[in-house]
Image: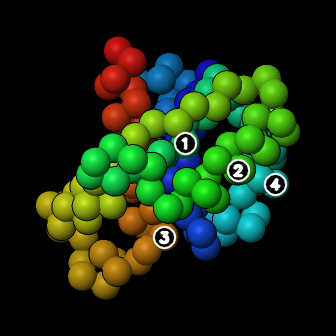
């Protein structure tokens, strides 16, 4: 079964998923946030998902950031519409910075680095990789 990670945003949401053996985190796609719940229902119907990990935005002092007012209701809805799949939050501090750094180090062109959807997908992959490392 796969583990799915979500980098939830106001307009766009980045998604990442593990392989079925849960060894590798891969970017999946970026979805318009307005279409996210429908996309997740379709994905879970096609692929066995063991768990969903949602990035929890935190400030440097450890307090939740302002985006939590959107994320917590989303997590609550997700738990209602997919009761068979555990949903948990995972600290996502610095994922956007790490995503930009990874893009720079990989040699991606400047134009590609400005693609916010790609940044969101890479951020979801970093969230998933961090969760996997914390649970090994």
Q: Is 126 placed above or below 48 here?
A: below
Asked where in the image residue 41 lies, by quadrant, the reply is: top right
Q: Residues within 10 Å of mark 4 (few under 14, many from 20)?
A: few
Is there a contact, CB below 8 Å, between mark 1 and mark 2? Answer: yes
Q: Which residue is mark 1?
A: 54
- Give the SS element for disc 2: helix
Q: Which quarter of the rendering shows the C terminus?
A: top left
Compare marks 4 and 2 and give the one earlier in the sequence: 4
Circles 3, 1 touching at the beta carbon (< 8 Å): no
The residue under the point 48% across, 46% down is 55
Vertical comparison of 109 with 12: above or below:
below
Does label 2 or label 3 sit earlier along the sequence?
2
Residue 111 placement, left or right of 83: left
Residue 74's mark? Answer: 2
Q: CA distance from mark 4 to mark 2?
A: 13 Å
Tell me which residue sits at (59%, 69%) in the image. 10
For disc 3, the neighbor class at 10 Å (few under 14, some 14 to 19, many from 20) is some
Q: Residue furthest top?
A: 136
Q: Which residue is mark 4?
A: 38
Residue on which the image places disc 3: 117
Q: Residue 121, percent across and down?
A: 46, 58
Task: Determine whether 20 is above or below 17 in the image.
Answer: above
Q: Measure how far apart labels 1 and 2 are at the Cα level.
A: 10 Å
């Amino acid at each position: 079964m796969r583990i799915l990670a979500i980098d939830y945003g106001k307009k766009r949401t980045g998604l990442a998923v593990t392989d079925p053996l849960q060894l590798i985190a891969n970017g999946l796609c970026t979805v318009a946030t307005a279409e996210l719940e429908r996309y997740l229902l379709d994905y879970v119907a096609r692929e066995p998902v063991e768990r969903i990990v949602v990035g929890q935005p935190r400030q440097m002092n450890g307090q939740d950031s302002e985006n939590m007012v959107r994320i917590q209701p989303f997590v609550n809805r997700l738990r209602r519409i997919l009761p068979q799949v555990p949903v948990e939050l995972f600290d996502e501090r610095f994922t956007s910075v790490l995503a930009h750094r990874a893009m720079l180090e990989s040699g991606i062109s400047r134009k590609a680095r400005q693609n916010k959807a790609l940044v969101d997908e890479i951020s979801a992959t970093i969230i998933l990789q961090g969760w996997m490392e914390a649970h090994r």
